[in-house]
Amino acid sequence: MASLLLNPCPNTTSNFTPLQFPLSNHFSHKTPARISIKCNLAEQLKKVENGKPPPFSSQSFGMKQFALENTINQNDTRLRIFSGTANPALAQEIACYMGLQLGKIKIKRFADGEIYVQLQESVRGCDVFLVQPTCPPANENLMELLIMIDACRRASAKNITAVIPYFGYARADRKTQGRESIAAKLVANLITEAGANRVLACDLHSGQSMGYFDIPVDHVYGQPVILDYLASKTICSDDLVVVSPDVGGVARARAFAKKLSDAPLAIVDKRRHGHNVAEVMNLIGDVKGKVAVMVDDMIDTAGTIAKGAALLHQEGAREVYACSTHAVFSPPAIERLSSGLFQEVIITNTIPISEKNYFPQLTILSVANLLGETIWRVHDDCSVGFEPYSSLGID
Protein backbone atom coordinates (compact mmCIF):
# COMPACT_ATOMS: atom_id res chain seq x y z
CA MET A 1 0.00 0.00 0.00
CA ALA A 2 1.85 3.03 -1.29
CA SER A 3 1.47 6.26 0.63
CA LEU A 4 2.47 9.88 0.21
CA LEU A 5 2.72 12.46 2.98
CA LEU A 6 3.07 15.93 1.59
CA ASN A 7 5.21 17.98 3.96
CA PRO A 8 4.80 21.74 4.18
CA CYS A 9 7.39 23.92 2.54
CA PRO A 10 9.92 25.65 4.82
CA ASN A 11 8.83 28.81 6.55
CA THR A 12 9.06 31.55 3.96
CA THR A 13 8.03 35.10 4.40
CA SER A 14 7.29 37.45 1.57
CA ASN A 15 6.65 41.12 1.30
CA PHE A 16 3.86 40.36 -1.10
CA THR A 17 2.38 43.12 -3.22
CA PRO A 18 -0.03 42.96 -6.11
CA LEU A 19 1.69 41.70 -9.22
CA GLN A 20 2.77 44.44 -11.56
CA PHE A 21 2.50 44.04 -15.29
CA PRO A 22 4.61 46.76 -16.92
CA LEU A 23 2.42 47.55 -19.91
CA SER A 24 4.63 50.53 -20.61
CA ASN A 25 7.42 48.06 -21.32
CA HIS A 26 5.46 46.42 -24.08
CA PHE A 27 6.23 46.76 -27.72
CA SER A 28 5.29 50.17 -29.00
CA HIS A 29 5.41 51.70 -32.44
CA LYS A 30 6.97 54.73 -30.76
CA THR A 31 9.99 52.76 -29.57
CA PRO A 32 13.21 52.41 -31.58
CA ALA A 33 13.41 49.81 -34.31
CA ARG A 34 15.22 47.41 -32.03
CA ILE A 35 14.27 47.23 -28.38
CA SER A 36 15.61 45.31 -25.42
CA ILE A 37 13.35 45.44 -22.39
CA LYS A 38 13.96 43.96 -18.95
CA CYS A 39 10.73 43.39 -17.03
CA ASN A 40 10.53 42.95 -13.26
CA LEU A 41 8.08 40.08 -13.44
CA ALA A 42 10.22 38.17 -15.89
CA GLU A 43 12.94 38.15 -13.25
CA GLN A 44 10.52 36.82 -10.66
CA LEU A 45 9.30 33.91 -12.74
CA LYS A 46 10.80 30.50 -12.35
CA LYS A 47 11.98 29.47 -15.80
CA VAL A 48 13.41 26.44 -17.46
CA GLU A 49 15.48 27.49 -20.44
CA ASN A 50 17.41 25.25 -22.78
CA GLY A 51 15.99 22.27 -20.97
CA LYS A 52 17.91 22.98 -17.73
CA PRO A 53 15.92 24.27 -14.74
CA PRO A 54 17.74 26.38 -12.13
CA PRO A 55 17.60 25.24 -8.50
CA PHE A 56 14.50 26.49 -6.68
CA SER A 57 15.09 29.64 -4.71
CA SER A 58 12.68 31.94 -2.97
CA GLN A 59 14.66 34.83 -4.43
CA SER A 60 13.54 33.74 -7.92
CA PHE A 61 10.11 35.08 -7.01
CA GLY A 62 11.39 38.43 -5.81
CA MET A 63 10.54 37.57 -2.21
CA LYS A 64 12.26 39.58 0.52
CA GLN A 65 12.70 38.85 4.16
CA PHE A 66 11.06 41.44 6.35
CA ALA A 67 10.57 42.25 10.04
CA LEU A 68 9.43 39.47 12.33
CA GLU A 69 6.30 41.36 13.33
CA ASN A 70 5.12 41.21 9.71
CA THR A 71 5.58 37.46 9.46
CA ILE A 72 2.40 35.51 8.78
CA ASN A 73 1.80 32.93 11.47
CA GLN A 74 0.21 29.79 10.12
CA ASN A 75 -1.72 29.34 13.37
CA ASP A 76 -3.12 32.88 13.30
CA THR A 77 -4.75 32.71 9.89
CA ARG A 78 -7.86 30.92 8.76
CA LEU A 79 -6.29 30.33 5.36
CA ARG A 80 -5.13 26.81 4.56
CA ILE A 81 -3.52 25.54 1.36
CA PHE A 82 -3.31 21.83 0.60
CA SER A 83 -1.76 20.09 -2.37
CA GLY A 84 -2.75 16.93 -4.14
CA THR A 85 -0.23 14.70 -5.87
CA ALA A 86 -0.80 16.10 -9.38
CA ASN A 87 1.48 19.16 -9.11
CA PRO A 88 2.97 19.54 -5.62
CA ALA A 89 5.83 21.72 -6.91
CA LEU A 90 3.44 24.44 -8.08
CA ALA A 91 1.47 24.26 -4.83
CA GLN A 92 4.66 24.67 -2.86
CA GLU A 93 5.67 27.70 -4.93
CA ILE A 94 2.26 29.26 -4.33
CA ALA A 95 2.53 28.71 -0.59
CA CYS A 96 6.07 30.10 -0.49
CA TYR A 97 5.02 33.19 -2.44
CA MET A 98 2.26 33.77 0.10
CA GLY A 99 4.56 33.21 3.06
CA LEU A 100 2.56 30.21 4.24
CA GLN A 101 3.19 26.53 4.79
CA LEU A 102 1.41 23.85 2.83
CA GLY A 103 -1.12 22.06 4.99
CA LYS A 104 -0.28 18.54 6.10
CA ILE A 105 -2.27 15.93 4.24
CA LYS A 106 -1.92 12.19 3.87
CA ILE A 107 -2.73 10.70 0.48
CA LYS A 108 -2.22 7.04 -0.26
CA ARG A 109 -3.46 4.38 -2.63
CA PHE A 110 -4.51 0.90 -1.68
CA ALA A 111 -3.34 -2.14 -3.59
CA ASP A 112 -6.47 -2.08 -5.76
CA GLY A 113 -5.94 1.60 -6.68
CA GLU A 114 -8.47 3.15 -4.31
CA ILE A 115 -7.46 6.58 -2.98
CA TYR A 116 -7.33 7.45 0.71
CA VAL A 117 -7.13 11.04 1.97
CA GLN A 118 -6.73 12.26 5.55
CA LEU A 119 -6.07 15.83 6.66
CA GLN A 120 -3.29 15.96 9.24
CA GLU A 121 -4.42 19.24 10.80
CA SER A 122 -7.67 20.93 11.77
CA VAL A 123 -9.50 22.99 9.16
CA ARG A 124 -12.65 23.69 11.19
CA GLY A 125 -13.93 27.13 10.22
CA CYS A 126 -11.05 27.68 7.80
CA ASP A 127 -10.88 28.97 4.25
CA VAL A 128 -9.34 25.98 2.44
CA PHE A 129 -7.71 26.02 -1.00
CA LEU A 130 -6.95 22.70 -2.68
CA VAL A 131 -4.35 22.88 -5.47
CA GLN A 132 -4.92 19.98 -7.85
CA PRO A 133 -4.88 20.20 -11.65
CA THR A 134 -6.77 17.41 -13.37
CA CYS A 135 -3.91 16.72 -15.78
CA PRO A 136 -2.86 13.24 -16.94
CA PRO A 137 -3.65 10.79 -15.51
CA ALA A 138 -6.86 12.82 -15.60
CA ASN A 139 -9.18 10.27 -13.99
CA GLU A 140 -6.80 9.58 -11.09
CA ASN A 141 -6.23 13.26 -10.37
CA LEU A 142 -9.90 14.16 -10.70
CA MET A 143 -10.94 11.43 -8.27
CA GLU A 144 -8.23 12.53 -5.85
CA LEU A 145 -9.55 16.10 -5.98
CA LEU A 146 -13.09 14.96 -5.26
CA ILE A 147 -11.96 12.93 -2.24
CA MET A 148 -9.89 15.87 -0.94
CA ILE A 149 -12.94 18.13 -1.19
CA ASP A 150 -15.05 15.56 0.62
CA ALA A 151 -12.44 15.23 3.38
CA CYS A 152 -12.42 19.01 3.91
CA ARG A 153 -16.20 19.19 3.94
CA ARG A 154 -16.45 16.45 6.56
CA ALA A 155 -13.75 18.22 8.60
CA SER A 156 -16.05 21.29 8.85
CA ALA A 157 -14.08 23.65 6.62
CA LYS A 158 -15.92 26.95 6.24
CA ASN A 159 -15.13 27.46 2.55
CA ILE A 160 -13.53 25.04 0.08
CA THR A 161 -11.97 26.38 -3.11
CA ALA A 162 -10.76 23.94 -5.75
CA VAL A 163 -7.71 25.53 -7.37
CA ILE A 164 -7.53 23.80 -10.75
CA PRO A 165 -4.65 25.27 -12.79
CA TYR A 166 -5.54 22.88 -15.63
CA PHE A 167 -9.16 21.77 -15.96
CA GLY A 168 -9.32 18.37 -17.63
CA TYR A 169 -12.24 17.36 -19.83
CA ALA A 170 -12.63 21.03 -20.81
CA ARG A 171 -12.53 20.16 -24.50
CA ALA A 172 -15.71 18.10 -24.15
CA ASP A 173 -17.76 21.27 -23.74
CA ARG A 174 -20.34 20.76 -26.48
CA LYS A 175 -21.81 18.17 -28.80
CA THR A 176 -20.12 18.18 -32.20
CA GLN A 177 -21.65 14.85 -33.25
CA GLY A 178 -24.71 12.89 -32.27
CA ARG A 179 -24.82 10.83 -29.08
CA GLU A 180 -21.77 12.52 -27.52
CA SER A 181 -21.42 13.37 -23.85
CA ILE A 182 -20.64 16.84 -22.52
CA ALA A 183 -18.07 15.68 -20.00
CA ALA A 184 -17.11 19.20 -18.91
CA LYS A 185 -20.58 19.69 -17.43
CA LEU A 186 -20.43 16.28 -15.74
CA VAL A 187 -17.08 17.08 -14.11
CA ALA A 188 -18.42 20.46 -12.97
CA ASN A 189 -21.36 18.70 -11.31
CA LEU A 190 -19.03 16.22 -9.60
CA ILE A 191 -16.87 18.99 -8.13
CA THR A 192 -19.93 20.88 -6.93
CA GLU A 193 -21.62 17.85 -5.40
CA ALA A 194 -18.39 16.82 -3.66
CA GLY A 195 -18.67 20.01 -1.60
CA ALA A 196 -16.59 22.73 -3.28
CA ASN A 197 -17.86 26.27 -2.68
CA ARG A 198 -15.75 27.92 -5.36
CA VAL A 199 -13.45 27.06 -8.26
CA LEU A 200 -10.29 28.90 -9.30
CA ALA A 201 -9.26 27.90 -12.82
CA CYS A 202 -6.57 29.08 -15.20
CA ASP A 203 -7.15 29.45 -18.95
CA LEU A 204 -10.22 27.31 -19.49
CA HIS A 205 -10.44 25.85 -22.98
CA SER A 206 -13.63 27.82 -23.58
CA GLY A 207 -15.29 30.55 -21.57
CA GLN A 208 -18.68 28.83 -21.54
CA SER A 209 -17.22 26.16 -19.24
CA MET A 210 -17.68 28.61 -16.36
CA GLY A 211 -21.41 28.36 -16.90
CA TYR A 212 -21.34 24.62 -16.24
CA PHE A 213 -20.67 25.30 -12.56
CA ASP A 214 -23.46 26.21 -10.15
CA ILE A 215 -20.87 27.78 -7.84
CA PRO A 216 -18.68 30.89 -8.36
CA VAL A 217 -15.74 30.45 -10.74
CA ASP A 218 -12.72 32.75 -10.71
CA HIS A 219 -11.11 32.51 -14.13
CA VAL A 220 -7.59 33.88 -14.49
CA TYR A 221 -5.39 33.93 -17.56
CA GLY A 222 -1.83 32.67 -17.61
CA GLN A 223 -1.03 34.28 -20.93
CA PRO A 224 -0.10 37.72 -19.46
CA VAL A 225 2.84 35.92 -17.85
CA ILE A 226 3.92 34.83 -21.33
CA LEU A 227 3.32 38.34 -22.66
CA ASP A 228 5.64 39.81 -20.04
CA TYR A 229 8.32 37.28 -20.93
CA LEU A 230 8.03 38.14 -24.62
CA ALA A 231 8.34 41.83 -23.76
CA SER A 232 11.70 41.11 -22.16
CA LYS A 233 13.09 39.72 -25.40
CA THR A 234 14.87 41.73 -28.08
CA ILE A 235 12.33 41.62 -30.89
CA CYS A 236 11.43 44.48 -33.22
CA SER A 237 7.77 45.31 -32.69
CA ASP A 238 7.26 45.93 -36.40
CA ASP A 239 8.34 42.37 -37.18
CA LEU A 240 5.76 40.67 -34.97
CA VAL A 241 2.66 38.85 -36.13
CA VAL A 242 0.41 36.85 -33.81
CA VAL A 243 -0.95 33.63 -35.29
CA SER A 244 -3.99 31.63 -34.23
CA PRO A 245 -3.44 27.92 -34.98
CA ASP A 246 -7.17 27.48 -35.70
CA VAL A 247 -10.30 29.52 -36.23
CA GLY A 248 -11.58 28.69 -32.74
CA GLY A 249 -8.66 30.51 -31.12
CA VAL A 250 -9.05 33.78 -33.03
CA ALA A 251 -10.52 35.70 -30.07
CA ARG A 252 -7.66 34.57 -27.82
CA ALA A 253 -5.02 35.47 -30.42
CA ARG A 254 -6.65 38.86 -31.13
CA ALA A 255 -6.57 39.78 -27.44
CA PHE A 256 -2.96 38.61 -27.26
CA ALA A 257 -2.06 40.73 -30.30
CA LYS A 258 -3.63 43.85 -28.75
CA LYS A 259 -1.28 43.55 -25.79
CA LEU A 260 1.68 43.41 -28.19
CA SER A 261 1.11 46.95 -29.48
CA ASP A 262 -1.82 45.79 -31.59
CA ALA A 263 0.33 43.44 -33.67
CA PRO A 264 -1.20 42.10 -36.91
CA LEU A 265 -3.10 38.82 -36.81
CA ALA A 266 -2.87 35.72 -38.99
CA ILE A 267 -5.07 32.62 -38.90
CA VAL A 268 -4.29 29.03 -39.84
CA ASP A 269 -7.29 27.35 -41.42
CA LYS A 270 -7.44 23.62 -40.78
CA ARG A 271 -9.75 20.68 -41.14
CA ARG A 272 -9.88 18.14 -38.33
CA HIS A 273 -10.66 14.57 -39.39
CA GLY A 274 -10.71 13.13 -35.88
CA HIS A 275 -9.55 13.66 -32.33
CA ASN A 276 -5.87 14.69 -32.20
CA VAL A 277 -5.74 14.58 -36.03
CA ALA A 278 -5.48 17.87 -37.90
CA GLU A 279 -4.75 18.89 -41.48
CA VAL A 280 -3.68 22.43 -42.31
CA MET A 281 -5.40 23.85 -45.36
CA ASN A 282 -4.63 27.55 -45.71
CA LEU A 283 -3.15 30.65 -44.11
CA ILE A 284 -5.10 33.88 -43.72
CA GLY A 285 -2.74 36.83 -43.31
CA ASP A 286 0.83 37.81 -44.16
CA VAL A 287 3.81 36.37 -42.29
CA LYS A 288 6.58 36.82 -44.86
CA GLY A 289 9.77 37.99 -43.15
CA LYS A 290 7.96 38.21 -39.81
CA VAL A 291 8.48 36.73 -36.35
CA ALA A 292 5.36 34.62 -35.90
CA VAL A 293 4.03 34.02 -32.38
CA MET A 294 1.57 31.13 -32.32
CA VAL A 295 -0.83 31.33 -29.36
CA ASP A 296 -2.98 28.51 -27.99
CA ASP A 297 -4.42 27.53 -24.63
CA MET A 298 -2.87 24.06 -24.63
CA ILE A 299 -0.48 21.80 -26.51
CA ASP A 300 -1.53 18.15 -26.47
CA THR A 301 0.02 16.04 -29.23
CA ALA A 302 1.34 19.24 -30.92
CA GLY A 303 -0.09 18.11 -34.26
CA THR A 304 -2.02 21.31 -34.89
CA ILE A 305 0.71 23.73 -33.84
CA ALA A 306 3.49 21.78 -35.59
CA LYS A 307 1.66 21.65 -38.91
CA GLY A 308 0.80 25.30 -38.51
CA ALA A 309 4.48 26.15 -37.92
CA ALA A 310 5.47 24.22 -41.04
CA LEU A 311 2.96 26.24 -43.07
CA LEU A 312 4.29 29.50 -41.61
CA HIS A 313 7.82 28.60 -42.68
CA GLN A 314 6.53 27.79 -46.16
CA GLU A 315 4.89 31.22 -46.28
CA GLY A 316 8.20 32.91 -45.43
CA ALA A 317 8.10 33.43 -41.65
CA ARG A 318 11.58 34.21 -40.29
CA GLU A 319 11.06 32.68 -36.86
CA VAL A 320 8.19 30.88 -35.15
CA TYR A 321 7.47 30.96 -31.41
CA ALA A 322 4.92 28.65 -29.77
CA CYS A 323 3.14 30.00 -26.69
CA SER A 324 0.73 27.96 -24.59
CA THR A 325 -0.48 27.97 -20.99
CA HIS A 326 -1.03 24.23 -20.62
CA ALA A 327 1.58 21.72 -21.75
CA VAL A 328 -0.21 18.37 -21.87
CA PHE A 329 2.55 16.95 -24.12
CA SER A 330 1.00 13.63 -25.11
CA PRO A 331 3.24 11.55 -27.41
CA PRO A 332 4.59 12.42 -29.95
CA ALA A 333 4.48 16.08 -28.86
CA ILE A 334 8.13 16.27 -27.77
CA GLU A 335 9.41 14.96 -31.10
CA ARG A 336 7.30 17.46 -33.02
CA LEU A 337 8.20 20.44 -30.85
CA SER A 338 11.94 19.72 -30.85
CA SER A 339 12.16 19.07 -34.59
CA GLY A 340 13.50 22.55 -35.37
CA LEU A 341 10.26 24.21 -36.42
CA PHE A 342 10.22 26.51 -33.40
CA GLN A 343 12.69 29.11 -32.23
CA GLU A 344 11.26 28.70 -28.72
CA VAL A 345 8.36 26.88 -27.06
CA ILE A 346 7.04 28.93 -24.15
CA ILE A 347 4.70 27.28 -21.63
CA THR A 348 3.72 27.61 -17.98
CA ASN A 349 3.89 25.15 -15.09
CA THR A 350 0.14 24.58 -14.67
CA ILE A 351 0.98 20.99 -15.61
CA PRO A 352 4.22 19.44 -14.29
CA ILE A 353 6.79 18.61 -16.95
CA SER A 354 9.03 15.62 -16.29
CA GLU A 355 12.73 16.10 -16.84
CA LYS A 356 12.76 13.52 -19.63
CA ASN A 357 10.51 15.84 -21.66
CA TYR A 358 12.87 18.82 -21.55
CA PHE A 359 14.34 19.92 -24.87
CA PRO A 360 16.59 22.87 -25.81
CA GLN A 361 13.83 25.14 -27.15
CA LEU A 362 11.63 24.75 -24.05
CA THR A 363 10.99 27.64 -21.65
CA ILE A 364 8.75 27.14 -18.60
CA LEU A 365 7.32 30.14 -16.76
CA SER A 366 5.75 29.94 -13.32
CA VAL A 367 2.17 31.06 -12.60
CA ALA A 368 2.68 30.69 -8.83
CA ASN A 369 2.67 34.47 -8.23
CA LEU A 370 -0.48 34.88 -10.29
CA LEU A 371 -2.39 32.11 -8.49
CA GLY A 372 -1.03 33.11 -5.09
CA GLU A 373 -2.17 36.71 -5.52
CA THR A 374 -5.60 35.54 -6.66
CA ILE A 375 -5.93 33.27 -3.62
CA TRP A 376 -5.13 36.20 -1.32
CA ARG A 377 -7.81 38.31 -2.96
CA VAL A 378 -10.42 35.56 -2.79
CA HIS A 379 -9.60 34.96 0.87
CA ASP A 380 -9.82 38.69 1.68
CA ASP A 381 -13.08 39.06 -0.28
CA CYS A 382 -11.40 41.48 -2.65
CA SER A 383 -11.96 41.80 -6.36
CA VAL A 384 -9.76 39.49 -8.41
CA GLY A 385 -10.10 41.89 -11.32
CA PHE A 386 -6.61 43.28 -10.87
CA GLU A 387 -5.47 44.44 -14.27
CA PRO A 388 -4.02 43.19 -16.40
CA TYR A 389 -3.91 39.72 -14.91
CA SER A 390 -7.65 39.30 -14.52
CA SER A 391 -8.43 39.32 -18.19
CA LEU A 392 -7.01 39.49 -21.66
CA GLY A 393 -10.06 41.43 -22.76
CA ILE A 394 -11.35 38.56 -24.89
CA ASP A 395 -14.60 39.50 -26.54
Image (spheres, rainbow, N blue to C red):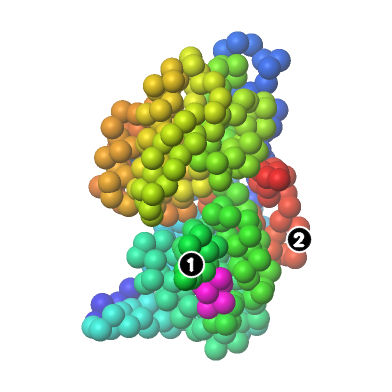
Provide the residue designation for mark 1.
178
Q: Position of residue 277 (x, y in %)?
A: 36, 48
Residue stretch in magenta: 185-190
Give residue 382's mark: 2
Q: Position of residue 268 (x, y in %)?
A: 49, 34
Kindly indicate the quadrant of the structure image that contains residue 258: top right
Q: Which residue lies at the image location 68% right of the left edge and 17% below the top edge?
A: 29
Q: Position of residue 163 (x, y in %)?
A: 55, 65
Q: Nearer the viewer, residue 359 or 338?
A: 338
- Amino acid carrying mark 1 in the image: Gly
Quarter of the figure that contains the C terminus = top right
| Type of secondary structure dominating the magenta stretch | helix
At mark 1, the secondary structure is loop
Residue 135, relative to residue 346: is it above or below?
A: below
Q: Furthest-top residue in view?
A: 33
Q: Label 2 neighbourhood size at 10 Å, few (<14), some (14-19), many (20+)?
A: few
